[in-house]
Image: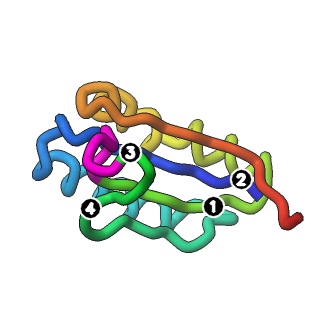
Amino acid sequence: MFNVLFLFPKTADSQAVDSFIATTVHGMRSQPGQGPVFVSEGALMGPLGRDIPYSRILQTSIDSPENMMSAINSAGAQSSKPVMQELGVMLLLYEAREP
């Protein structure tokens, strides 16, 4: 399984982030092998306290490398790249397994 995290910086415009999340979630749900999609609520917490540089997280998973590549190469993902760059989104993709 592959996990996907979109980390939105505090400096990003909140309305633009909301719009990006709505559009992205809609596109994600049509991808084969797509797992549940989660969006953080409220302030993020961690050892850095208020110094965490991110305001929102969008999280999902995809079941296989083939479906991950299909999602990455989809028209929706390709068209979202400039918006992600403008918003300063940190995108993390990683393979995960149960221990």
Q: Secondary structure at mark 1?
A: strand
Residue located beneath label 2 in the image: 2
Q: In the displayed structure, does residue 47 sit left or right of residue 56?
A: right
Residue located beneath label 3 in the image: 48
Crowdedness of circle 3 by 10 Å Cα count: few (<14), some, many (20+)? Answer: few
Q: Is residue 90 magenta?
A: no
Residue located beneath label 1 in the image: 61
The Cα atoms of the two marked residues, 3 and 1, are separated by 26 Å
Q: Secondary structure at mark 4?
A: loop
Residue located beneath label 4 in the image: 43
State if disc 2 and disc 1 touch (CB < 8 Å): yes
Q: Amino acid at mark 3?
A: Leu
Farthest residue in the bottom direction?
A: 36
Q: In the displayed structure, does residue 28 sit left or right of residue 68?
A: left
Q: Amino acid at mark 1?
A: Ser
Q: Is residue 49 above or below residue 80?
A: below
Whichever of callouts 2 and 4 sits on the residue coming sooner in the sequence is 2
Residue in view at x 64 percent, y 54 percent: 3
Residue in view at x 79 percent, y 47 percent: 65
Q: Quadrant of residue 84?
A: top left
Q: Secondary structure at mark 2?
A: strand
Whichever of callouts 3 and 4 sits on the residue coming sooner in the sequence is 4
